[in-house]
Image: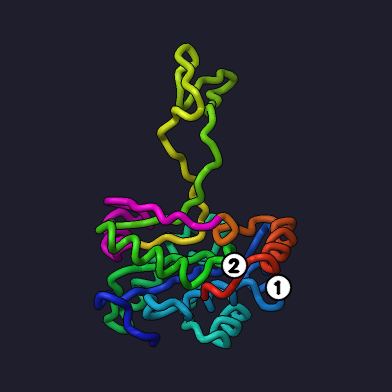
Amino acid sequence: MKKSAEMDKNILAIIPARGGSERIPGKNIIPFAGKPLLAWTVEAALNSNTVSRTIVSTDSDEITAVSRDLGAEVITRPPELSQAHSTSEMALIHVLDELRENENYAPDIIVFLQATSPLRSPNDIDGAVGTLLAEDADSLLSVNPIPGPGFLWHLNGKTASPFNFDPQNRPRTQEFVEEYFAENGSMYVFHREVIEKYGCRLGGKVALFHQPLENGFEIDKPSDMKIMEILVKQVDRTDG
C-alpha cells in the first residue's frame, strides 16, 4: 500500500483495462514510446502524492502480469463485466464490492483513470484531487477548453438552430462571456458515496479540472498512437 493521502483521505486509483479492444487489438499493453501503454497510467498513479492505493481491473492474464510487474494491485474482472458493452461503472463497482467483501476496505475517494490517456501526469492527478477537496465537490472530471469563443450551432434532423446566441441580435465575439469545456476522459475523481448513490462516476456537485490539451489527449484509434508518440517527445515530463 502506498503512502497516506493528504487530509487523512484514503484515495484509491482504479484503472479499468480489459483484454478485448475492437479498434486497437491489445490496446492496453501495446508498446507505446518504449513501454506498454498501460504503464504510463499505472506509473502516474503510483507516483502521485495523493493516491493511497492503485488497482487495475482486468480480465486478461497478460494485463495482470504487466500490472503487477509495474507495482499495481490487480482485481480480476469476471467475463460478464468484460464485454464490449460493459460500462466502466460496472468495473468500478465490482472493484469496490470485492474490496469491501474480502478486505472490509472502503476508500473515501476514487480516482478513475483511463489507460488511453498516457500523458496524464502525477501532478494532474494531485491537482484534480486537490480541486475536488478545495471546491467541496462530490465529483470531478478533467476537461479541455473548447477554443473560441465562437458562434455554435446544433442540428436537429435537417434543421439547424443556434446554440449560444441570437442571430437577430448577433453579439461581437469579444462579448461572449460563457466558456465551454470538452470532457476529455482522462480523469474522474469522486467520493465513494457518489457511485453508491447514483451508480455513476459523476453526481452531486460536479467540479472541473482544466488539463493541458496534450495531457488529456485520448488514444482511440491507431492514428492517435502516432500523434501521441510525437507529443511524448515534445512534452516536458519533469512535472512528475
| Residue at the extreme top | 168
The CA span between labels 1 and 2 is: 10 Å
User: Measuring 56% from the left and 68% from the top, which residue is drawn there?
Assistant: 18
Q: Circle 1 is placed at which residue position?
A: 33
| Residue at the extreme front | 174
Residue 66 placement (x, y as % from top left) = 60, 82
Instruction: Judge by depth and name the residue closer to the eye, 49 or 95.
Output: 49
Quadrant position of residue 140:
bottom left
Three-letter code for the amino acid on which mark 2 is drawn: Pro
Q: Is residue 217 left or right of residue 103?
A: right
Which part of the image, by quadrant, shows the N terminus? bottom left
Q: Which residues are magenta?
A: 190-212
Three-letter code for the amino acid on which mark 1 is drawn: Ala
Can residue 184 be seen by looking at this rendering? Answer: yes
- On residue 118, the disc is 2
User: Measuring 51% from the left and 86% from the top, which residue is drawn there?
Assistant: 71
